[in-house]
Image (cartoon, grey):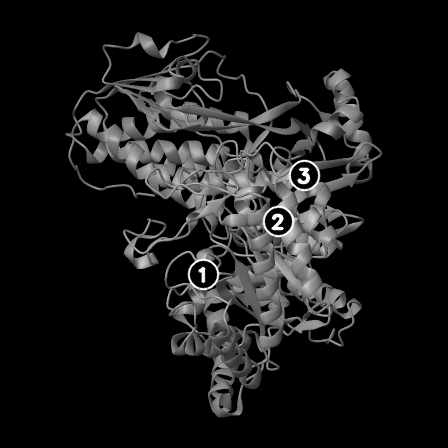
């Protein structure tokens, strides 16, 4: 976000720009205010189809951080806005008869009509012309320098030029309606109610004296069962009043065009067409559950204003606006996406303990985390830690409830194997074996990281035959020499650490006979390759080797290779075994409809596509010691049209659970070269969460997870049972030991040779953490609600 620029930069302030703004919502009005204030000679006209005092909905909400921005850009409108706002500091979550309040949030709200009146009056005072009750067409202003299209979600101009803008509209399944009440609220309030029809949610906040906004939400099945489609506004309000009667008391539910609808998540690949630019909801929407729709619109206006100040010509300014603003908009939309999906699937979490449910609600959009909440609401997190420990105790562990360890340092049992903590080192190919034999590199690599303390450590994908390799440097377990080398590494890990060691077995399939990663990942070998096979004869890249479609003899031979490797793994002493059915390798090629075009009993339906992977798993499970656990790695989505769906991934996990799997290692993608993943922090965790809570199996999540704080957040919210990290372990073999020192988990294993180092880091961490938390608390600015509290107390 740019700041107000003192002094003229680029465009002369006397330049008489002619600007038409279509839509007198917050985005259009605020842009008009900023531009007219900076360029008094600009001729700006705002057109609006409604009357000036028309408004639909009830209140709007901003964070303290957003108000700080408004203060920088226009102190006059900021002063008016803050005079009218209601302030609160807490979020209150009501579920199953419990209320959990978390402070330090800093919110404020006012009536949408009040906000629009303030902005209209400010614009008028600066000389902005406003024309109401006029259906302006953005096509009609060819004689203007700039046309701002800010006419909302249903923008006619955007729809007319949808192909140019690359518009996508994702109509979300949940139904919602904006209503209001006279019920006063002292917190941003979430209420969750289980009814005979299904769950209902209320998002509620006060926006002025004796007025609060209530957004009611439910899933489509509950909506139908409750008969809401047949009710008018008054009937809907009466039903909501009945459902939330215990909280509303005698206060009515108010309506104002309170129509049940679905939220449209709108994105545009381009925001500019000639001298016309989309702004606000016409450009991009953000779900109401993160309260950012009006914020996003007004910050759009600020970004466009900054571009007009900086650039001398309108086309350059529009290009800068889109280039500079897009990342922030997409980040906000991503957070909103994650948040809305949590509410869409709230039924998954209603069986959770109320405090864990509330923790999940608070951390759903990833902006708020375990450590963040420890600073703001230490009693809440202490209760969460205790509830997590109580679950561990019910599983048979004698863990402390008075001073429970952080979730990442709680043990987990898989069959008879006890994992001492919930941190795992993810499988990562080293491409450094000679003829499949792991050497000194592997001994140091695995040995150092095991000493660093993760509860569970995975080998790289270890190939079950020479022709199963991805590259010539891949490790294998199909010869006596390889078995002997792995036994040496396993023995070292067991002798010098408390880490459990899992062997991942796989077959490269059509992605075999390729170069080492640093020479060209997934690119075919120029020479020295071998024949590859797959579910169907489809190459990974157009220039990749075309695989042979497997026949029954091939399947029998591959199954035998997996069984032989399993028997070797048992002799080598591994604690656990994982079957690799992800990332487009051989078994994954059967699961995905993008790579399986077979017409026999192993293709077509998901049941058929599962058949061969399940046959391999069953054969391995029969050969693996019954007291030792097995996991399976899956790609929960192919990130490509026509690929595996989230529902498929739940069904796949369920099928492996029925076959005896103890843990599902949830990854995504790498199935086809045309995949387009949506990367971000913890980007694969939602898939692990869905499988865990719908398929009813333990899961391990992985993917851009980098900090102990993220690990604790994931575990406490019930999103996974183990958290795997790859690259952080490459950079820091002592990652888990450092985290243990930070959280005071002194039970972590450390070999005697390194005990002095452990003692020192634990001593230092006590002081460092206290200093860090003190600095964070002292450095946190007081929220406006906190600043107003002493004044209110003095006045009383």
Q: Earlier in the sequence, mark 2 or mark 1?
A: 1
Q: Earlier in the sequence, mark 3 or mark 1?
A: 1
Q: Earlier in the sequence, mark 2 or mark 3?
A: 3
Q: Would residue 112 appear left or right of 658 to someone viewing this image?
A: left
Tell me: residue 298, above or below residue 190. Answer: above
Nearest-to-viewer mark from 2 and 1: 1
Q: Which residue is mark 3?
A: 607
Quarter of image, res 542: top left
Q: Which residue is mark 2?
A: 613
Tell me: residue 376, above or below residue 332. Answer: below
Tell me: residue 176, above or below residue 536. Answer: above
- Is residue 82 or residue 575 the one in the foreground? 575
Instruction: Check residue 466 in the rendering and tell me which mark sits there, or answer none.
Output: 1
Image coordinates of residue 370 in percent, x first then y, are 57, 61
Badge 3 vs badge 1, beta-carbon distance below 8 Å: no
Instruction: Check residue 441 in the rendering and tell me which mark sits there, or answer none.
Output: none
Q: CA distance from mark 3 to mark 1?
A: 30 Å
Q: Secondary structure at mark 3?
A: helix
Q: Is residue 245 visible?
A: yes
């Amino acid at each position: 976000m740019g700041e107000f620029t003192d002094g003229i930069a680029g465009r002369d302030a006397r330049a008489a720009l002619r600007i038409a703004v279509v839509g007198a919502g917050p985005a259009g009005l605020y842009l008009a205010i900023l531009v007219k204030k900076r360029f008094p000679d600009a001729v700006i006209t705002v057109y609006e189809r409604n009357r000036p005092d028309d408004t639909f909905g009830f209140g709007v909400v901003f964070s303290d951080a957003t108000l700080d921005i408004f203060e920088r850009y226009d102190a006059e409108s900021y002063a008016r806005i803050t005079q009218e706002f209601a302030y609160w500091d807490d979020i209150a979550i009501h579920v199953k008869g419990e209320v959990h309040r978390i402070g330090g949030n800093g919110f404020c709200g006012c009536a949408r009509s009040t906000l629009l009146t303030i902005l209209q009056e400010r614009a008028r005072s600066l000389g902005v012309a406003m024309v109401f009750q006029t259906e302006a067409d953005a096509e009609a202003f060819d004689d203007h320098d700039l046309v701002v299209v800010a006419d909302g979600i249903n923008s006619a101009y955007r729809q007319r030029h949808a192909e140019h803008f690359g518009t996508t509209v994702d109509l979300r399944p949940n139904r919602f309606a904006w209503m209001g009440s006279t019920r006063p609220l002292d917190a941003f309030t979430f209420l969750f109610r289980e009814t005979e029809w299904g769950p209902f949610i209320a998002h509620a906040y006060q926006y002025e004296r004796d007025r609060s906004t209530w957004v009611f939400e439910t899933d489509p099945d509950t909506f139908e069962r409750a008969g809401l489609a047949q009710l008018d506004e008054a009937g809907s309000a009466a039903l909501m009043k009945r459902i939330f009667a215990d909280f509303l008391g005698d206060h009515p539910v108010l309506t104002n065009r309170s129509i049940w609808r679905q939220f449209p998540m709108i994105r545009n690949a381009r925001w500019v067409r000639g001298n016309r630019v989309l702004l606000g909801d016409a450009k991009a929407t953000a779900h109401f559950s993160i309260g950012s729709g009006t914020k996003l619109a007004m910050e759009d206006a600020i970004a466009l204003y900054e571009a007009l100040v900086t650039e001398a010509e309108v086309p350059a300014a529009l290009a800068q606006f889109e280039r500079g603003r897009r990342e922030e908009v997409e980040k906000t939309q991503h957070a909103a996406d994650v948040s809305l999906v949590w509410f869409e699937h709230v039924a998954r979490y209603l069986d959770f303990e109320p405090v864990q449910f509330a923790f999940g609600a608070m951390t759903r959009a990833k902006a708020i985390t375990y450590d963040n909440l420890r600073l703001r609401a230490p009693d809440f997190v202490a209760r969460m830690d205790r509830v997590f420990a109580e679950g561990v105790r019910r599983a048979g562990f004698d863990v402390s409830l008075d001073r429970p360890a952080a979730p990442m340092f709680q043990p987990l049992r898989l069959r008879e194997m006890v994992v001492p903590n919930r941190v795992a080192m993810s499988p990562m190919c080293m491409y450094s074996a000679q003829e499949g034999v792991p050497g000194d590199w592997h001994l140091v690599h695995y040995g150092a990281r095991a000493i660093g303390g993760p509860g569970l450590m995975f080998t790289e994908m270890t190939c079950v035959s020479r022709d199963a390799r991805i590259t010539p440097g891949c490790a294998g377990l199909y010869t006596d020499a390889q078995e002997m080398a792995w036994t040496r590494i396993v023995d070292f890990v067991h002798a010098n650490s408390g880490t459990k060691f899992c062997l991942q077995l796989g077959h490269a399939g059509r992605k075999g006979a390729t170069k080492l990663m640093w020479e060209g990942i997934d690119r075919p070998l120029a020479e020295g390759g071998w024949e590859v096979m797959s579910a169907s004869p489809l190459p990974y890249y157009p220039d990749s080797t075309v695989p042979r479609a497997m026949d029954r003899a091939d399947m029998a031979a591959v199954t035998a290779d997996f069984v032989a490797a399993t028997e070797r793994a048992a002799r080598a002493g591994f604690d656990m075994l994982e079957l690799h059915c992800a990332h487009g390798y051989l078994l994954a090629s059967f699961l995905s409809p993008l790579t399986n075009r077979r017409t026999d009993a192993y293709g077509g339906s998901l049941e058929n596509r599962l058949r061969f992977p399940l046959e391999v798993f069953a054969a391995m499970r029969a050969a693996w010691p019954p007291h030792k656990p097995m996991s399976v790695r899956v790609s929960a989505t192919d990130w490509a049209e026509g690929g595996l769906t989230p529902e498929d991934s739940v069904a796949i996990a369920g099928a492996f659970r029925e076959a005896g799997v103890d843990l599902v290692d949830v990854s995504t993608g790498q199935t086809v070269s045309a995949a387009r993943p949506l990367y971000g922090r913890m980007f694969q965790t939602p898939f692990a969460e869905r499988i865990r809570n719908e398929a009813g199996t333990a899961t391990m999540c992985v993917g851009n997870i980098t900090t102990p704080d993220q690990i604790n957040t994931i575990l406490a919210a019930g999103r996974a049972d183990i958290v795997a990290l790859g690259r952080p372990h490459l950079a820091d073999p002592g990652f888990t030991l450092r985290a243990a020192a930070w959280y005071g988990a002194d039970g972590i294993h450390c070999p005697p040779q390194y005990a002095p180092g452990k003692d020192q880091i634990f001593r230092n961490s006590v002081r460092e953490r206290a200093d860090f938390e003190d600095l964070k608390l002292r450095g946190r600015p007081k929220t406006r609600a906190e600043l107003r509290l002493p004044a209110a107390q003095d006045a009383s």
